[in-house]
Image (cartoon, rainbow, N blue to C red):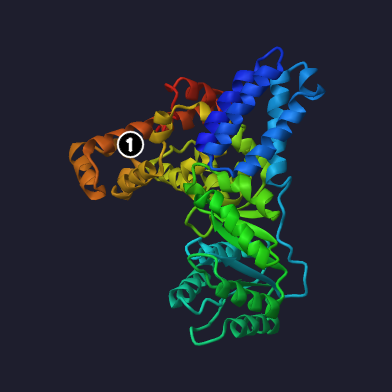
Amino acid sequence: MFESLTSRLSQTLRNLRGSGRLSEENIKDTLREVRMALLEADVALPVVRDFVEHVKQRAVGKEVMESLTPGQALVKIVHEELITLMGEANEELNLAAQPPAVVLVAGLQGAGKTTSIGKLARWLKEKRGKSVLVVSADIYRPAAIEQLETLAAEVGVEFFPSSGEQDPVDIARNAVDAARKKYVDVVLVDTAGRLHVDQAMMEEIQRVHAAINPVETLFVVDSMTGQDAANTAKAFGDALPLTGVILTKTDGDARGGAALSVRQITGKPIKFLGVGEKSTALEPFHPDRLASRILDMGDVLSLVEEVEGKVDRKKAEQLASKLKKGKGFDLEDFRDQLQQLQSLGGVGSLMDKLPGMANIPDAAKSQVNDKEFKRLEAIINSMTPGERRRPETIKGSRKRRIANGSGTQVQDVNRLLKQFTQMQKMMKKMKKGGMAKMMRGLKGGGGGMPGMPF
């Protein structure tokens, strides 16, 4: 998300950072570049116009002109205005209600509504410790009901059955009653989607809303529809008292215009981002962190939270203990490291959150991909337990067998063994001399990460 916008903005603002002084002329030139970058990212024109005007008013004032580092002062203003544009701070779900707290979810067909309910149910259960019941009031698509039942089983929450012969209002009301009797904390109600906004759809969802009086009414919208995402959210907002937005498919949206437009056009906060297909791929929306990512400052806070929440501490401690006792780092340990990286949403997700990524050439970034990691894992899985523990035994005929078993070439097996040897050396350095030696090892490794496929 925001790849092209980040690249253009960071380059434009980088040119100003070292400036000894700024004039109205070079501020004007910079803002013209900012304006073009936002429009190319598919941010709505009225939003771009207001944003640039706010930055301009602050930039030509004392705040920048009299600053000792005017270039940095302007970058700071752009950063602050981006945060203001997207909503200042993360707005959490309001679940302060007599249980069950009811959350109604609306959106067009294909936006990722049902999937988002599964992700949200998991997030509420794991991050907020809530018991959750999900129900589908979409009587037009039996597949939607079946999909929600499958998702409920996958994430371990309760599913309330429904069918196409029932009235959506009755389904929703009965689900809330059932949740009340079972002392369930939160009810998530899925509603019917359409291919476009129509009167019949609005009337039906308004009836459901009136019957269950939800504490949160969330609109799910596909970020890849760009400006249309904000306009559709506004149409729903005019018909329903929306309390927030879930922006889906942001991992496939290189422009990011919807994230920058939704708040200003609808007046409703973005509460969550869908960042992938897995049921764990839902992130609370933090405007300040996203603004930092847009300006290539990274998002270290989200990265730390992700690592703390998803890395297997037990395995990490076992590996540390093993190295401390002088036992070697083997291919099973290497496979564990690959799996840990993938559990964090993959390398691309991690790179998005690291500062300075816009400066790395696209050719280098393209080499860092999760397919390569899966291929390395497949090669290791094709080895015997003995070979994983003693990689030095893997010679000619064994290499051919491993390559055939993993659907790869012998040279791929050779490459993996070379990367593994580099990582083994790095682990020895960590054991003998700690982090300082490891960092020197990284610098001497030709720019790449020892043991990693890049």
Relative to 11, 206 lies left or right: right
Residue 209 at x, y percent in the picture? 67, 75
SS assignment at label 1: helix
Q: Which residue appears farthest toward the bottom when viewing the image?
A: 165
Residue 325 visible to an observer of this rendering: no
Q: Position of residue 264 (x, y in %)?
A: 68, 48
Write down the quadrant of residue 123 in the picture: bottom right
Residue occupying the point 54% across, 53% down: 228
The residue where tag 1 is placed is 416
Q: Quadrant of residue 282?
A: bottom right
Q: 135 or 62, which is in the foreground? A: 62
From the top left corner, tell me how far across and down residue 147 is, in percent. Answer: 46, 71
Can I make out residue 384 in this image? yes
Residue type, mark 1 in image: Leu
Q: Nearer the viewer, residue 369 or 78?
A: 78
Q: Determine whether 28 is above or below 248 in the image.
A: above
The residue at the point 65 percent across, 79 percent down is 207
**Residue at 58%, 24% in the rendered image:** 12
> For mark 1, does the 10 Å Cα neighbourhood hold few (<14), some (14 to 19), or many (20 or more) residues?
many
Q: What quarter of the picture does the C terminus occupy?
A: top left
Q: Position of residue 331 (x, y in %)?
A: 38, 42
Give the answer, above or below, for where 431 lies relative to 376.
above
> Between residues 276 and 384, which one lies in front from this camera angle?
276
Residue drawn at x 80%, y 17% is 66
